[in-house]
Amino acid sequence: MSYTEFQNLNLSDDFLFAKVMEDEAVLRPVVEKILDIRIREMTIVQSQRMIEIEPDSKGIRLDIMADDVAGSRYTVEMQNENEYNINKRSRYYHSMMDLDLLEKGKKYNRLQKNIVIFICTFQPFVRSGRHRYFFEKRCVQEPELALEDGVTTVILSTKGTKKDIDEEMAAFLRYVEDSSEEVADRSDSSLVKLIHAKVCTVKQSKVREAEYMKLQERDQNNFQRGWSEGLRKGRSEGLREGRSEGLREGKRQGELLNIIQMTRALLRQGKSLNTLTDLLETDAKIAGKIAGLILENENLSDEEILKKIIV
């Protein structure tokens, strides 16, 4: 298990992103730019906030959470891996934040406006190609009729291809992926220069570097413990189950290759993801991942796609 040296971190790294954005003077102009609004005052609630409503329920960890004086709550999240679930992730995040906000016995009208912002280093909607997506609830029959429940999801993609943002937003998204001195120097964006100054401050902090190293050491130890446990189980059960497991894995890979080939054919026919899932009789996440890989790079062979989805 490898990790990036502290001085080489980009803003896309969760740790660096949280440490930079926990400064209200940096977070506020970033949120203002993303939402194209003006915020008079913003207060950081917490960075790296864990919300767990019940011991047995799935919790969430929010990179940065903040409130403004008008009563809106914001969370800004860095997403580096496309798990093809950004829609359901958004739903769950909003639900958990509302449960965290509303005390027992309080009226629903006490719920604050709830804005979730995802900054993605991948393209969640390949066929669209936008850099920025706004989602709010509206009536299907009358699109001009908004539900006005105070829930908004905004998704940014560093992999957008359309000309749907201005140069300052484009510069910010470039800096997310490459937070080097060279990129900051070449940029005319005052926002990028503000963020870069904070990035430099964080990277110069021995306390922050030690904190980062401690987290990496913890993750490394957890990985090694899991690996060792797996080896112990493998030694005790491997002789007995190894051959059967090998046969099962071979059969599984053969089935996945068939699904990949069928997916290519169905995509050429313009079939939707829901149709793919129904026709292939496979898990929506697997179908979505295969379709995404094919759409992102049509030159990938079936075997290369197989390797990516069985890792």
Image: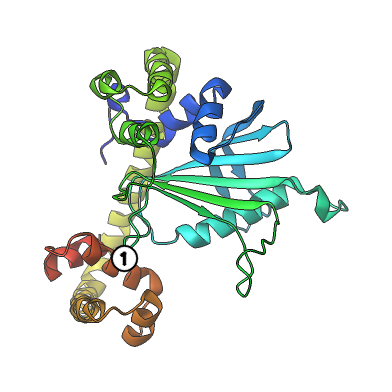
Say left or right for 77 vs 277.
right
Q: What residue type is labelled 1?
A: Lys
* Outermost residue, right side: 105
Q: Which is more toward the observer, 90 or 244?
A: 90
Identify the element where label 1 is drawn.
helix
Which quarter of the rendered picture does the N terminus lie within?
top left
Q: Which is more toward the observer, 266 or 133?
A: 133
Which quarter of the rendered picture does the C terminus lie within?
bottom left
Residue 22 image position (x, y, % from top left): 54, 26
Q: Residue at x 62, y 62 (%)?
A: 137
Q: Can residue 210 be seen in this view?
A: no
Q: Residue at x 42, y 36 (%)?
A: 14
Residue 126 position by quadrant: bottom left
Residue 59 image position (x, y, % from top left): 58, 51
Say left or right for 53 vs 204.
right
Say left or right for 212 vs 72.
left
According to the image, label 1 marks what residue? 289
Please, is residue 186 above or below residue 103 in the view? above
Residue 141 image position (x, y, % from top left): 62, 75
